Image (cartoon, coloured by chain):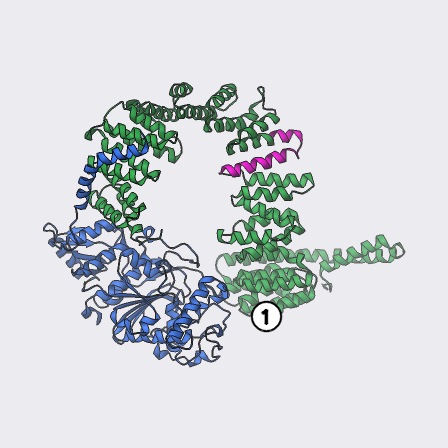
Chain colours: A green, B blue
Amino acid sequence: MRRPERSNAEVAEHAENAEVNLVTAPRETINRLCVLCALCVLCVGTSAPRRALAQAESRVLAEAGELERLGRHADAAARYRGILRTEPTSVPALLGLERVFTSLERLDSLVPLVRAALARDALNQTIHSLELRVWFALGHSDSVTAAARRWIALAPRSPDPYREWAFTVAQRGDLAGAKRALSEGASRLGDAALAQDLAQLTTLAGEWTEAARQWVAVVRGNPALLPSATGSLTRAPAVARDEMLSALLGVRGDSTSRRMAADLLAGWGRADEAWPLLDATLPQDPNAAAVLLQRFAERTVTARSRRNALVRGYALERLATLVDAAAAGRVRLQAAQAYADAGDLAAAQRMLERAGAGAEAGGAVAPAMASLIRALAEQGSAEEAERRLLAWNDRLSGDDRETLRQAVAWAWARRGELDRAEAVLAPDSGVAAAAVRGWIALYRGDLGLAREQLRAAGPYTGSREEATRRMSMLVLVERIGTDRLPEFGRAMLALARGDTMQALTDLEAAARKLSLASGRADVLGFAGEVALARRDYQAAEDLLVRALAADSVGPAAPAAELALARVQAETGRTEVAIHQLEHLILAHPQSAMVPQARRLRDRLRGVVPE
Amino acid sequence: MRRRDFLRAAVAAGAAEAAAVRAMLAAAPAASPASAAPSAAAPSLLLPMDDAQSNHLKAYGVTYRALQRGSRAEWLLNYRGGSFLLPAETATERDAALTGVTVEPTSDGDVVAVRGEIQANNMDAVPLEKAPKVAVYVPPNTAPWDDAVTMSLEYAGIEYQKIWDPEVLGGRLKDFEWLHLHHEDFTGQFSKFYLTYSGAFWLSEMVERNQETARRLGLPNVPALKKAVAREIRRFVQDGGFLFAMCTATETIEIALAGEGVDVAAPYADGTSMDPDASAKLDWSRSFAFRGVQLEQSSAIASFSDIDGHQVNNPPKRQPLGAFTLFNFSAKIDPVPTMLVQCHRQVVPDFYGLTTSFQRERLKPDVTVLADEPGAPWVKYIHGESQKGTWTYLGGHDPEDPQHQIGDPPTDLSLHANSPGYRLILNNVLFPAAKKRELKT
């Protein structure tokens, strides 16, 4: 069989051109039609033997693959070479030889076969890429360059040679070489041709500021790539971020770079800084603006701080003005939730009203209303929170009802309205409610009931911080040898309200009522820690010393000694603090305070960094 | 009650109690360091160094301070991870309690059993005579947090003194038994930091300080200064000193010693280009560990020579990290290398440094390899003798910060109290304390 001089691809291309010319130049119709027919006959005439050849090739490839899998690389190589004798441009065979020759450390044998393939199929991208890889693996960097230049000469307007050249050297760690290749391509083809490749390369190299500049160019050319760009740049380490932002924000009047800066800031949890940038550069086109606002809202959905929640509310409120009515309602509810999380109750209320969240509103509004009620309770508006809770009771989920009752109970309790707090909790019997009841009993000074309720709640409810606080209080209360101590209750309520001075006074009074055996030392020690927390070092030291005087060997003593050492350290008496810690460690070797004491001792002695 | 009334009342009520408490606290339960009475119940303390030990690093400190007090100690090579046997003195018990080091009271009968086990196995008991005087070669105003050795010495509570070029060239090395070098560049090229940190304040400050020191000591430039220091260090070792070096210091001191009279520094260091034939002119008979080394001629490449196997700052040649394996030696026949490899882990994760490892083919034939990465052409930890003294090199910057970058937060060793990598460093600190007769093997 006589093989056509051209490849089938070239033939098909020629045929396509002939067909186009047929449409546009009627005077040449017949000649061109004849050419087309002749070519089709040629294709059909040769297609049957070619199918048989292809099937045979597939069979041999499968055999070779199996031999590879069995580790018989030399045998596999023979199969691949067999294919190349009849089909020198067979890409699967060439790639197979690349694998097995690498295992056999005979990669240099592939070079003539690759060159022969390129002689027949000079524009084949895969074979050109293979040639680059082979030369690179053989350590012939000059040959890599020469091979790349040959490819460039054959396809001068194509970015592929530069791209593959860069990719090959980058994969082996030569990022500088890769950058040179891409830069050369950009200088010849224009910045846009390889902008994304350069951006990805500089990102990979950790050149974050340069990467930010590169990605701006990419996004300017194609705004839809903004998520890809910021997705790559978000991984930048914290130390690099300020410089990246300076580079982005230093370009005056460039809205693309500012939007990218805003998106990055949002991704880094700095939504409050991002919002002014985004707000100032939103596109005029409402659809485009809506896309950016929606993305900002999604990026900030896990916003932890109130400020971040607030700007999320702003973005959602703005978005609601750009979308259709049905979507606007949903968006306003999300805005209401965000505002409530941020503590801006007026804005939350405004959003709910505009969303149509009146008395008849349905369950879709419930999550937003739940956030609002929670915010009202946390801000101390117990009456308003309870009123809304009652109004929405049937429309809230069971979990929300329970947690909101606890929030409202806390709001009443902090105001000292303990009866109303208990009344709100009446329907609840779970451990979470027991925890709240335990604290309420504590505030009343009813230590017996407090012990019972806090024990029932255990560590099983609330956040880790809440559970730790609860269990610590239970330990303290269990050491106080009386069931009623109003002064202690007043102290705890004062603490809950943030009145530490009053709390210290009441704790002192409570301690005076206790005997040495009934927990005086524990209460004094606790008072000392309260004073330490508010940096009242003089009061803290006096209380802690008195606690140790009351009991220097009991279970409360190590905590008191540790707190005392902290006071001494904070007031610059480092040697005294070290001595105190050493006493704690040696006198109470089994205490759970000892590891903390050792660590503090190491820090004070300067043997570990601050 | 107003605040000041509260305070007055509290103070008045507590003053008497406070005085009593302070007196009680002053009478600490532990005895003073001067007290050294052994316990009758268990006359010895074993500091296990296997997984039973809660703080391996501070255990070296407890042993070192016992030696400082004049106590005896024994290093039980290969016994339970290289444990220490100390007399059961109150001061030692107090020290161990304060530092959280696990100790096991050991009766005479137990000690006999331990010695029997040592005798019957590849183990040995090496007496530790006295705490060595330790010097660390480091600029005077450097915090301890950027040097793995100073960090470990601080954490373990082992005293050391800092010395720098003026002290070395002033002959102060003879006051010490043990000298540590870390990431000093003895070729005088400032670790080639110009390539990546040009303009950084700390680099400018380092350059200025070194240039000023060279001027003050009458030397023409920093490479000349560092070569002079390298010569003194070699003399220190050959006169019987113990040298331990990590990171860049290992490679660059070798180049500086071999490069006597050869320009091995880039133009920014001494104003002249490196001798293009420098590699051929190096005299490796003057160095400790390496030979036949090819220097990196390009000042634009952040590498000194082909000694380093990993070439961390040379992207085309950079190698990934693996893990290195400590060799086993005969404790009775080769106590020195045995001491240096005592560890509760045989395989240790590797860690980068400006010099991470040492190409095997560059080692002199008399170098003892203490650890390597199996299958790799480089080794990690090496040791040798030079006349009366010894040297040990460990590649890498910080065993618990494998990819350390300048500006990274310092390593907090309280979080790595059982670090096998840091144990290798501290082995080198205690090794000079071993009785001299053991070192002649």
Residue sticking out furthest to the left: B40
In percent of width and height, residue A542 lies at 26, 38
With respect to residue B371, does A250 lie above or below? above
Q: Is residue A257 magenta?
A: no
For image coordinates 56% across by 37% down, the residue present is A312
> Along the line of sight, which residue is nearer the eye, A520 or B269?
A520
* Corner quadrant of residue A159: bottom right
With respect to residue B132, does B234 lie above or below? below
> Along the line of sight, which residue is nearer the eye, A372 or A199?
A372
With respect to residue A18, does A279 lie above or below? above
Residue A90 visible within the image = no
The type of residue carrying mark 1 is: Ser
For mark 1, give the secondary structure: helix
> Range of the magenta residues?
A305-330
Which chain letter goes with mark 1? A
Give the labeled residue for mark 1.
A143
